[in-house]
Image: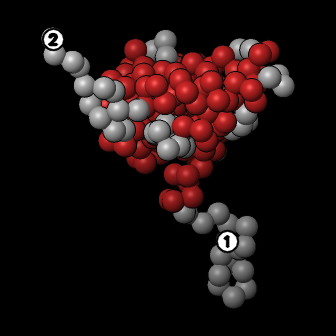
Amino acid sequence: MQDDDGAPPATARRRDSAATRAAILQAARRLFVERGYDGAGVRDIAGAVGVDPRLIGRYFGSKEKLFAEVVGLAYQKSLMMTPELNGEAARALLIDADRSALEGLLLTLRSAANPQAAAIMRDIIENSYQHLLADALPGRQTDSRAALLVAICSGVLLTRMILGNTQLNGPEAEDLIPLLHKALDAVAMAPEPPTTA
């Protein structure tokens, strides 16, 4: 149907592959956070956007690849816990209410029971965030120390944001910042070389 001037009506939906792809990605993120990897099917995601489920394969290749892209975005704003930034990191872990951090935790917890999803999340953490952190740390054993810093960060966020620990959410949380700062520095600082006897 056309208007008198031959142009399509203003209400006609124009094809915009970038917008469709972005809408699928946004819907997938929301559903993976709410339901986890196993609970969010391709049809659910496509239905949330109002598109044919085959478009997910067209734009992303598979549910696994779509999930990997969602995880990459969810983990994108991870903290750098290097000696010069650990004061800020400690404050962010104990005080900030970052919605993206909460979504990343929920996505992780609700998807970790699926071995394929767990492998995707582990690979993204290790090959992206943890690798960048290891490159920024001084001294030796940077890969292992980066992994430990990631575990400390995850544990604090889980205990505070998901479990709602009262001590980590109360007025005394501010007093814990210097202690967490020291704990992060203990791992992030270059370790002393081993002494030879």
Instruction: Tell how many labels.
Output: 2
Residue where numbered disc 2 is placed:
197
Name the residue at 57% across, 58% down.
19
The residue positioned farthest toward the bottom in the image shown: 5
Q: Amino acid at mark 1?
A: Met
x and y percentages locating residue 21 in the rendered image: 52, 51
In which image quadrant can residue 138 be found?
A: top left
Name the residue at 42% across, 22% down.
148
Quick one: label 2, few (<14), some, or many (20+) residues within 10 Å? few
x and y percentages locating residue 42 in the rendered image: 52, 31
Quick one: label 1, few (<14), some, or many (20+) residues within 10 Å? few
Front position in the image: 6 or 11 = 11
Front position in the image: 140 or 129 = 140
The disc placed on residue 1 is: 1
| 197 left or right, relative to 57 | left
Front position in the image: 50 or 93 = 93
Residue 27's place in the image compared with 5, above or below, is above
N-term mark: 1 or 2: 1
| 107 left or right, relative to 132 | right
Name the residue at 37% across, 43% down.
136
